[in-house]
Image (cartoon, rainbow, N blue to C red):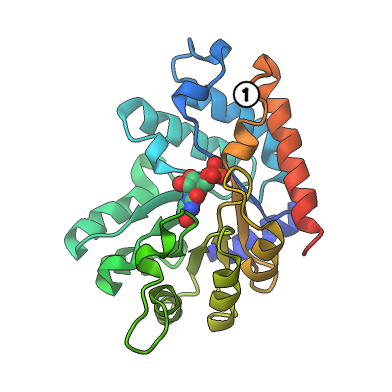
Amino acid sequence: MNFFDRLADRIATVDSVVSVGLDPDPARIPDHLQEHDLPRWAFNRRIIDATHEHAAAFKPNAAFYEDPDGWTALRETVAYAHGKDVPVLLDAKRADIGNTARKYAELLDDDGMDIDAITVNPYLGRDALEPFLSREDKGVIVLCRTSNPGGADLQGLELETGEPLYERVAAMADLWNGNDNVGLVVGATAPEELEEVREIVPDIPFLVPGVGAQGGDAEAAVEYGLADGVGLVNSSRGIIFAGEDEGEAFADAAGQAAKRLKKRLNRYR
Ligand SMILES: O=c1ccn([C@@H]2O[C@H](COP(=O)(O)O)[C@@H](O)[C@H]2O)c(=O)[nH]1
């Protein structure tokens, strides 16, 4: 089954478009888990237990796992999320020349790890994404208009046609979508751009980061992020560290935060 069909099923099952970002910053993991063999895995397991019933997907960001223990923690996390029937989107923002991109794409099913979708960077063009795009079973989520303050520095540059670069990326992603496996990253901190991109690609689901800690627009995230009801609105720190000062109750607080975000987003669905 295609990633977005699986995601649609999950959204229907939990009545939620919340993506719970699993960015387990070691410095913010509660003290009582620091002695664990793999603190990030111990943390994620508790977060998954507390939030999965509100999660349409989990989104670990590769930046928090790129060391030997980290990859083990990630592998355990992916398997555990799947055990709860939740798809996993790895936010890795990959792309490279074809030969290297093929190697990167092996990450999707690295040593038993079965990632459902991955974020990729369109800057190198189609051939750099081909090893991902050709994986019909995997979601390929292309950076379009990112949520960071400098997101417009390059992505907003006007082309000779007068359109900004992020609009061209959206149009190209539509051309790359022969396997119906392409999505776009458009940040909730750029609500006008969300609306513009949605006009260009009415049928492509978005991953919308930037609600929560980045203060993005939750209503616009839902209004423009979903295509036929399918899409994801991500919060990472706003959920997983909601109970940062609550010791062993940290996971309960994360569960409450995920539930609150689900209810808030559902008002606009
Ligand atoms: O444009 C983008 C693309 C990716 N991200 C990632 O999403 C989460 C957001 O974390 P918060 O704690 O909810 O701010 C994080 O992994 C980012 O690297 C993004 O924010 N914006």
**Residue 186 at x, y percent in the picture:** 52, 64
Q: Position of residue 151 (x, y in %)?
A: 42, 60
In the image, residue 154 above or below residue 239: below
Q: Which quarter of the rendered picture does the C terminus lie within?
A: bottom right
Instruction: Report if residue 59 is visible in the image.
Output: no
Asked whether, in this view, residue 204 is left or right of residue 65, the answer is right
Relative to 159, residue 229 above or below: above
Picture layout, residue 154 above or below residue 28: below
Residue labelled 1 has its Cβ within 8 Å of some atom of ligand 1: no
Residue 267, image quadrant: bottom right
Residue visible at 25% across and 71% down?
A: 127
Q: Which residue is mark 1?
A: 244
The image quarter containing residue 118 is bottom left
Give the residue drawn at x 52%, y 23%. Answer: 28
Which of the two residues, 251 or 103, is positioned nearer the viewer here? 251
Q: Residue at x 58, y 28 (%)?
A: 45
Q: Quadrant of the N terminus?
A: bottom right
Secondary structure, mark 1, is: loop
